[in-house]
Image: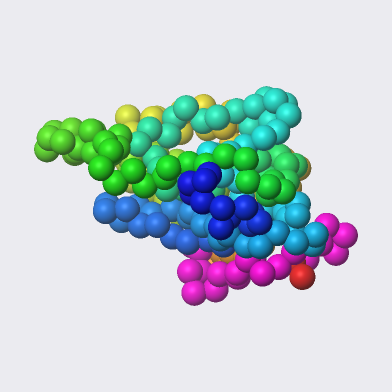
Amino acid sequence: HDMHDHQYDSMSNNICNINFSMDDEGYGVPSHFSMMENRTPKNMKKQLIALSQGCVFAKSKFLLDVPFDPYLPNLFNGEEFLFSARMWTSGWNFYNISRKICSHHYTRDKKPKYWNDNQNTDKKKKHYIHVKKISNQRVKHLIGLNNEIKSMNKKDQANCLTHIDKYGLGSVRTISDYYDFVGLTIREGEIDKDNVKDRCELIYNNNSKKWE
């Protein structure tokens, strides 16, 4: 949003629900979206279901606990969900900030994007799609969902699983608990997309471990 647009001065950004952005190749992974809401004393430091990579403030220890995974080329949708899952299972919680401090010109309709630059010839597009599929399958593997890694050739399998233990989930909380926290139900390795719980109007109670 534009920092000079004062309609947002009394509002905060709440990352509170999950969607399923399906890319053109059909290898969709979980993503999340946010909503603007009026700030009140109750939600001033509201706990969020995930973090946004565009605005993260934390002690630098998080980089040791959860180092950024460099083996996710061409990944866009799902990267923040994966990183949030790794952070949360490593014991980190996410909170919104109490006032507007920065903005991001997000869409930039007439500006070049990396996915355009990497698909401007048939050869580059084929390579881009292939590499993106490998990254998507790595995400699904890391967050415990059904994936296609076993059906890949040995070279793609090796690329998909490179240093997978170093960039895996944490051991403080389980991925199953994270799915419950964000409002997702997993059935036989697949997300039940018809049973997603909305957290947008709720506050998480750390004592009862429930959204209220």
Residue 59 location, x and y as percent? 73, 29
Q: Residue at x 12, y 38 (%)?
A: 122
In terms of image quadrants, where is residue 14? Answer: bottom right
x then y, percent, for residue 72? 43, 34
- Placement of 62 over or under 143, stated as above or below: above
Q: Is residue 102 left or right of residue 38?
A: left
Determine the residue located farthest toward the left in the rendered image.
122
| Residue at position x 71%, y 68% in the image | 202
Q: Position of residue 105 (x, y in %)?
A: 43, 42
Write down the region rendered in magenta: 188-210
**92 is higher (above) or lower (below) than 205:** above
**Does residue 31 appear in the picture of this structure?**
yes
Left or right: residue 10 compared with residue 139: right
Above or below: residue 123 compared with residue 189: above
Q: Quadrant of residue 113 in the image?
A: top left
Is residue 197 magenta-colored? yes
**Main SS category, magenta section:** loop
Instruction: Evaluate whether residue 178 shows in this view.
Output: no
Going by the image, does 153 lie left or right of 28? left
Q: Residue at x 27, y 52 (%)?
A: 25
Q: Is residue 185 left or right of residue 190?
A: right
Q: How many marks?
A: 0
Q: Which residue is the extreme one toward the bottom?
A: 194
- Decide which of 164, 98 is in the foreground and name it: 98
| Quarter placement of the C terminus | bottom right
Q: Would you identify the image quadrant in which residue 117 lies?
A: top left
Residue drawn at point x = 78 percent, y = 66 percent: 210
Judging depth in this view, the residue of 32 and 127 nearest the camera is: 32
Residue 167 located within the stretch drawn in magenta: no
Q: How is the image coloured?
A: rainbow
- Name the one closer to the observer, 167 or 92: 92
